[in-house]
Amino acid sequence: MEKLIEKGQILQRAGDLNSKVYLVQSGLLRSYSIDRKGREHIFMFAPEDWIVGDAIPPQQPCELFIDAIETSTVWVYEKDPEISMIDKERIRKRLEVIQKRLIMLMSATALERYEHFLRTYPDIVQRVPQRMIASFLGITPEALSKIKGRRRKDKGS
Amino acid sequence: MEKLIEKGQILQRAGDLNSKVYLVQSGLLRSYSIDRKGREHIFMFAPEDWIVGDAIPPQQPCELFIDAIETSTVWVYEKDPEISMIDKERIRKRLEVIQKRLIMLMSATALERYEHFLRTYPDIVQRVPQRMIASFLGITPEALSKIKGRRRKDKGS
DNA sequence: GGGAACCCTTAACCTGGATTAAGAAATGCG
DNA sequence: CGCATTTCTTAATCCAGGTTAAGGGTTCCC
């Protein structure tokens, strides 16, 4: 079943019961959590051809928010039986990406993570505000600004 | 196909080609990466009934090491067709755990992560050296020691 | 056009956890 | 047992990134 999501529209809130998973056809979504101190942490960007959803079992309350960074269209699936119909390869890919991300987060500095992000998602960089990139990298917008400043200098000299 | 792995034995090295995934029957394994500076980062502990493996496609070189913390027995599967045979639920569970872990890592302090670990894996705590717990939490053994000291005091007072 | 609401940057200061260095405790093994 | 190796702890110092604060730019509506 197809669905249109306007920019800024929230598809899912943490705490909701939501048995759906979304396959992005066009546009750009994001999933994120909000911690006790009110800070957002982006779990994943979902451009065209990606899956967004919460890995929580369908009966349990979600832990992620999902909303649209750009007006988007998605295919809606049920987590439970339908998801098995979706390409196995996409699930594997998802695991691969998260595995890489976790290792990055544990072993690389903020600068290294930023450069890796630029290399890996050059298209997304253009489409989202800096503060979301910072959030994805696990740092503050101020820290990202500082890093970019340092980088410009290093290149320039 | 069943396999016995002696304590300390390495099942897979980063850089290897390995198309296998392991379902632990008994014992305890771990998967981890080693960064440029030679530091280990534990990706996941795999006690009885868990899957260990690299989410990398079967033709590509692995990024994780896998070895046995305790002498263990595992079932060996091919990543490619056989893995689909394994319970869907176990794959979902795996995604869920990693999703939670990533969010934790981004939003909680080392102390919070440690207490969460104690609550979530009380059995594993007893079975692995502190330095591996530190590695799993994304901190140094020294920092974990400090945290435990602070905790003891707080409880005692 | 002119607020209002974001967004990005810079700079000064602070802090959690890293690093380094030593010992003490536990474990393994000849 | 007794020596070696690994593991854990403590303490001093350091630093990447967080926090706070302030100013300048954009974009969006009314």
Image (spheres, coloured by chain):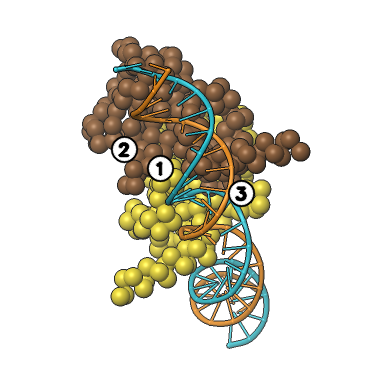
Chain colours: A brown, B yellow, C orange, D cyan
- Residue B103 got which mark? 1
Residue A103 visible somewhere in the drawing: no
- Residue A154 got which mark? none
Q: In terms of depth relative to the viewer, which is nearer, A130 or B67?
A: A130
Tell me the residue that label 2 is attached to. Answer: A63
Q: Is mark 1 on a helix, strand or loop?
A: helix
Q: Where residue B136 appears, x then y in whole percent?
A: 48, 53
Label 3 or label 1, whichever lies nearer to me, is 1
Residue at image position (28%, 32%) is A13
Q: Same chain for marks 3 and 2?
A: no
Q: Where residue D7 appears, x then y in whole percent?
A: 53, 67
- Residue B34 got which mark? 3
Q: Mark 1 lies on which chain?
A: B
Neighbourhood count class around disc 2 (C-alpha, 10 Å): few under 14, some 14–19, many 20 upward: many
Q: In terms of depth relative to the viewer, which is nearer, B91 or A42?
A: A42
Q: Mark 2 lies on which chain?
A: A
Q: Which amino acid does label 1 sit on?
A: Ile
Q: In which quarter of the image is residue B106?
A: top left
Mark 3–mark 2 Cα distance, whole angstroms, equals 30 Å
Q: Is mark 3 on a helix, strand or loop?
A: strand
Q: Same chain for marks 1 and 2?
A: no
Residue A73 visible somewhere in the drawing: yes
